[in-house]
């Protein structure tokens, strides 16, 4: 017996557009090559061991790359990275051009981190699980780079918003 009507994809997407989330560029670098995409679906899982998850569209041409490399880096962006976030979201189709638009540093693993990200988490892929249209990538954090300043680039109402701009808008 069904207790309620199913939620439509459009209703769910419209509701999720109202949820404010930090913007991240997820990168990989390894034997299969280098790639990256923009994502807001990232969160910690546990601190013992330090683990986080990222959601990646399973239809992405980069899925095999991430699975083969078995590692990824989560780069939390600042308001200065709005254009870069757009490039990695697909506005720039050429991967070399996407990476050329940023300044990258190498982790010991060979993964690349955005040099001026608020924080970058280098992760070993521990598990990947397909749920609906997306893969949930669960990674154990093996190295962290962080800076003490900067405000997060956020995504809400289908737009990029700088952290301080959102705070000022909420105060009004």
Image: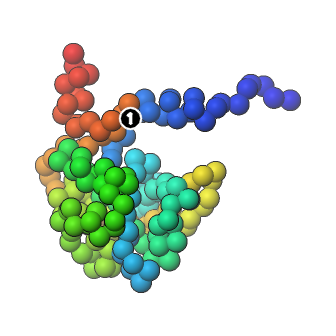
**Quarter of the picture holding the N terminus:** top right
Task: Answer with left or right where residue 114 lies relative to residue 65.
Answer: left
Residue nearest the observer in this picture, 164 or 49: 164
How far from the left and from the top, in percent, is residue 171?
22, 19
How far from the left and from the top, in percent, is residue 137?
50, 61
Query: Is 25 rendered above or below residue 125?
Result: above
Query: Is 3 rendered above or below residue 108?
Result: above
Query: Is 172 rendered above or below residue 70?
Result: above
Task: Answer with left or right where residue 164 lies relative to residue 75.
Answer: left
- The quadrant where residue 38 appears: bottom left
Residue nearest the observer in this picture, 20 or 11: 11
According to the picture, the residue beneath numbered tag 1 turns out to be: 158
- The quadrant where residue 136 appears: bottom right
- What residue is shown at x 27% (from left), y 75% (from top)? 107
How far from the left and from the top, in percent, is residue 3?
78, 25
- What residue is shown at x 65% (from left), y 30% (from top)? 7
Query: Is 29 rendered above or below residue 167?
Result: below
Residue nearest the observer in this picture, 148 or 64: 64
Q: Is residue 46 visible?
A: no
- What residue is shown at x 33% (from left), y 44% (from top)? 22
How was the colour assigned to the protein in this rendering? Answer: rainbow
Q: Is residue 30 visible?
A: yes
Q: Secondary structure at mark 1?
A: loop
Task: Answer with left or right where residue 143 lies relative to residue 4.
Answer: left
């Amino acid at each position: 017996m069904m207790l309620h009507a199913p939620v439509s994809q459009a209703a769910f997407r419209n509701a999720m557009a109202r949820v404010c989330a930090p913007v991240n560029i997820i990168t990989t670098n390894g034997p299969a090559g280098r790639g990256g995409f923009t994502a807001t679906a990232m969160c910690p899982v546990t601190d013992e061991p330090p683990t986080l998850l990222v959601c990646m569209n399973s239809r992405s041409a980069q899925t095999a790359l991430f699975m083969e490399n078995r590692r990824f880096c989560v780069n939390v962006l600042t308001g200065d990275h709005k254009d870069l976030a757009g490039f990695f979201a697909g506005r720039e189709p050429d991967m070399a051009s996407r990476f050329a638009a940023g300044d990258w540093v190498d982790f010991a693993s060979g993964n690349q981190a955005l040099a001026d990200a608020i924080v970058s988490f280098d992760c070993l892929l521990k598990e990947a699980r397909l749920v609906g249209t997306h893969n949930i990538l669960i990674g154990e954090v093996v190295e962290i780079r962080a800076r003490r300043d900067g405000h997060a680039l956020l995504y809400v109402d289908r737009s990029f918003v700088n952290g301080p701009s959102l705070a000022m808008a909420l105060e009004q």
